[in-house]
Amino acid sequence: MNTMNKQHFLSACGILLLMVGWTMQGCKPSTTAELGDPFNKLEGMHGVWELNAFLQTDLQNPLREVRDLSELYIDGEVTPMQVTLNEDGRYEVLLEKGQNYFGDKGQWSLDDETHPSYIIFESQDVFGTPLDTLVYNLGSVVRPHESVLDVVLERSCGDLPLLSYTFSFTRQ
């Protein structure tokens, strides 16, 4: 077989394979499915959340060392910190042990209701006067049927991240 015949033979085989592929592609059943409505991210946040773990991560350590500091909040005797996120945007924190990083009460919101990355707490005094605005990373988006909420507070010195605190809550 000379070079010209080999080229024609290979071209014919290639065309034949393409035609068989197109034919097989046409035999596949078409899939039609709907993803459904997206979950309401705000609805997933509503409820009473109880602290079940408090972790500290050293962001300067190349190994990202994580320390479990839950005993600062949870001792088995008193109720751990509870955060109530109401549908009307109000929140309240009940705390018997440990430091309150959220404020006692105020307004809460998400940075983006469809694709949230942060939860925002605007703490207020007993008269409703704004005290502070606190912005925390969300460990993940919470859907209405899920029971875990992770809130991450990062501490830095200027632009240099030093530590992060992860508050892990379960829905009550």
Image: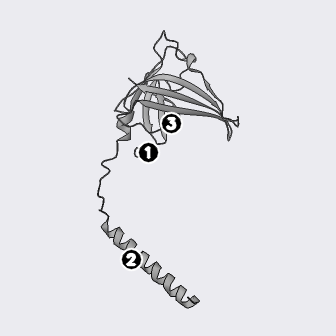
Percent position (x, y) of residue 137?
52, 37
The answer to which quarter of the image holds residue 31 is: bottom left
Residue sitting at x 49%, y 84%: 9
Residue 35 percent coordinates (x, y): 32, 50
User: Which residue appears at 48% of the width and 22% of the height?
Assistant: 52
Answer left or right for 5 relative to 19. right
Residue annotated with mark 3: 139
**Three-letter residue code for mark 1:** Asp
Which of the two discs, 3 and 2, labels the residue nearer the N terminus? Answer: 2
Check if mark 3's residue and mark 2's residue have beta carbons within 8 Å: no
Question: First in sequence: mark 2 or mark 1?
Answer: 2
Q: Position of residue 7 (x, y in %)?
A: 54, 86
Q: What residue is pinned by disc 1?
A: 112
- In the depicted view, which residue is nearer to us: 160 or 107? 160
Q: CA distance from mark 2 to mark 1?
A: 49 Å
**Quadrant that contains the C terminus:** top left
Give SS at disc 1. Answer: loop
Could you tell me the amino acid type at mark 3?
Gly
Q: What amino acid type is highlighted by mark number 2?
A: Met
The residue depicted at 45 percent of the width and 14 percent of the height is 79
Residue 15 image position (x, y, % from top left): 44, 80
Gap in angstroms between the C-alphas marked 3 and 2: 50 Å
